[in-house]
């Protein structure tokens, strides 16, 4: 759609002549295109951003069950809702499916492919390469497509990690003045999310260290050709699940702003709130621990931070642990990633 010249004017003419006719239009996810829509189709267009599949959607497509759990809303979840037998059954029944989903099930088309190689080939060539070598360069008039592709793939393989522009320049050879343009294009096209470290000061927050997350955990899994039997797969899986968790948090209207917090070597993965400079007590504090057992020592910094700032509860996104535990007045909600 976005490659048709003056498509907005064509649709406007049809709509104005026959308002009873409705059009469904689709194309690459780009804020640039959305802004064009607003200018020429004001009052005539409703925008829908279609995200990659959630795990609940994946299960509905794959098995067509009569009933599945509604995803948990971290902002509104209660202890009573968390302690639910059906949720425990869902976790146990689909435990293996969840890891398949994280590796290669984020897009409906992969469910039609039985071979993992074909799934990864589809993700790499029909999604990643199409976006970074074709769609985004055309929309943003980027001539050096190989440079953009190299940058995108560096960020994909290191999704959920802190990055600095100077390190990306060194790794890719991209001009330091050009790099921000590429990052802006990747982020505006919804290919990439960049979240800053949290600070009370808006000025400091803008200059803070940043993390980059790609839109789907399937992207790094495909480029790295990951399998369940891959050595150290649990370490990779933790980063992939963290990437998925961010995408799920973004879909909640209560979490319009998401940051991470870092102090020395200690970190809280996500601080999520409704607006940019909320008070600490108004934010949701979320740590991702996708592992078989979570010891108290694994969430030591989260607990310390919550106590020091008199924050009554926090959240740990787990592999299979589903409970609320009271740590001397601070409640921690353990929520399996498959329920988000």
Image: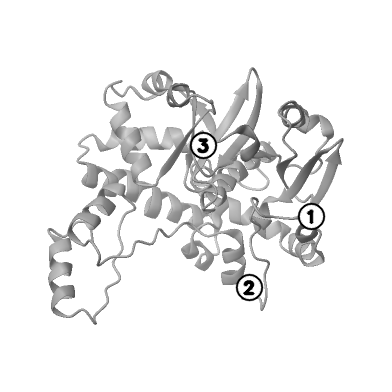
* Residue receiving disc 1: 79
Q: Left or right? Give the position of 69 relative to 293.
A: left
Neighbours of disc 3 within 10 Å: few (<14), some (14-19), many (20+)? many
Whether residue 41 is visible? yes
The CA span between labels 2 and 1 is 29 Å
**Residue under the image location 61 percent in, 76 percent down:** 64
Say which label, 2 or 1, has the lower sequence index: 2
The percent position of residue 184, horizontal first and vertical second, equals: 33, 36
- Side of 88 relative to 284 (left or right): right
Work out whether mark 2 precedes mark 3 in sequence or the reverse, and give the earlier one: 2
> How many C-alpha atoms fall within 10 Å of the one at disc 1: few (<14), some, or many (≥20)?
few
Q: Rounded to the nearest whole Å, what is the CA distance between mark 3 and mark 1?
A: 32 Å
Q: Is the residue 171 above or below the residue 187 in the image?
A: above
x, y percent for residue 294? 80, 39
Do tag 2 and tag 3 residues touch (Cβ < 8 Å)?
no
Label 1 sits on a secondary structure element that is: helix
Q: Earlier in the sequence, mark 3 or mark 1?
A: 1
Nearer the observer: mark 3 or 1; the answer is 1
Give the label on residue 63, or none: 2
Q: x%, y% of residue 119?
A: 50, 57
Indicate whether 276 appears above or below 131: above
Residue 47 picture quarter: bottom left
Regarding mark 3 in the picture, which secondary structure is present there? loop
- Give the residue displayed 48% in from the left and 57% down from the top: 52
The circle on residue 159 is 3
Residue 278 point in image, percent of width and height:
55, 36
Quadrant of the frame with the C terminus: bottom right
Secondary structure at numbered mark 2? helix
In the figure, is residue 281 to the left or right of 223? right
Q: Is residue 231 visible?
A: no
Determine whether 288 is above or below 49 in the image. above
């Amino acid at each position: 759609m976005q490659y048709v010249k003056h498509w907005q004017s064509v649709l406007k003419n049809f709509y104005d002549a026959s308002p009873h006719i409705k059009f469904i239009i689709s194309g690459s996810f780009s804020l640039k295109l959305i802004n064009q829509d607003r200018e020429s189709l004001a009052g005539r267009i409703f925008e829908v951003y279609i995200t990659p599949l959630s795990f609940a959607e994946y299960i509905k497509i794959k098995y067509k069950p009569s009933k599945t759990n509604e995803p948990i809303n971290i902002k509104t979840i209660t202890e009573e809702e968390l302690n639910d037998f059906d949720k425990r059954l869902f976790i146990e029944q689909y435990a293996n499916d969840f890891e398949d989903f994280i590796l290669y099930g984020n897009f409906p088309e992969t469910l039609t492919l039985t071979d993992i190689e074909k799934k990864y080939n589809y993700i790499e060539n029909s999604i990643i390469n199409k976006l970074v070598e074709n769609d985004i360069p055309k929309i943003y008039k980027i001539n050096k497509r190989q440079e953009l592709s190299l940058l995108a793939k560096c960020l994909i393989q290191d999704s959920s990690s802190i990055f600095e522009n100077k390190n990306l320049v060194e790794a890719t050879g991209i001009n330091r003045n050009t790099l921000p343009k590429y990052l802006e294009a990747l982020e505006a096209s919804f290919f990439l999310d960049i979240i800053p470290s949290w600070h009370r000061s808006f000025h400091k927050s803008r200059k803070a260290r940043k993390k980059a997350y790609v839109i789907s955990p399937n992207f790094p899994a495909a480029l790295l050709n990951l399998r369940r039997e891959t050595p150290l797969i649990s370490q990779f899986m933790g980063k992939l699940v963290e990437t998925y968790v961010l995408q799920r948090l973004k879909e909640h209207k209560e979490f319009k702003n998401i940051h991470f917090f870092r102090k020395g070597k200690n970190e809280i993965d996500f601080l999520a709130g409704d607006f940019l400079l909320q008070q600490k007590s108004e934010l949701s504090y979320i740590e991702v621990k996708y592992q078989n057992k979570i010891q108290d020592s694994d969430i030591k910094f989260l607990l310390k931070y919550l106590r020091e700032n008199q924050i009554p509860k926090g959240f740990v996104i787990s592999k299979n642990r589903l409970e609320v535990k009271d740590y001397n007045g601070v409640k921690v909600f353990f929520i399996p990633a498959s329920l988000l």
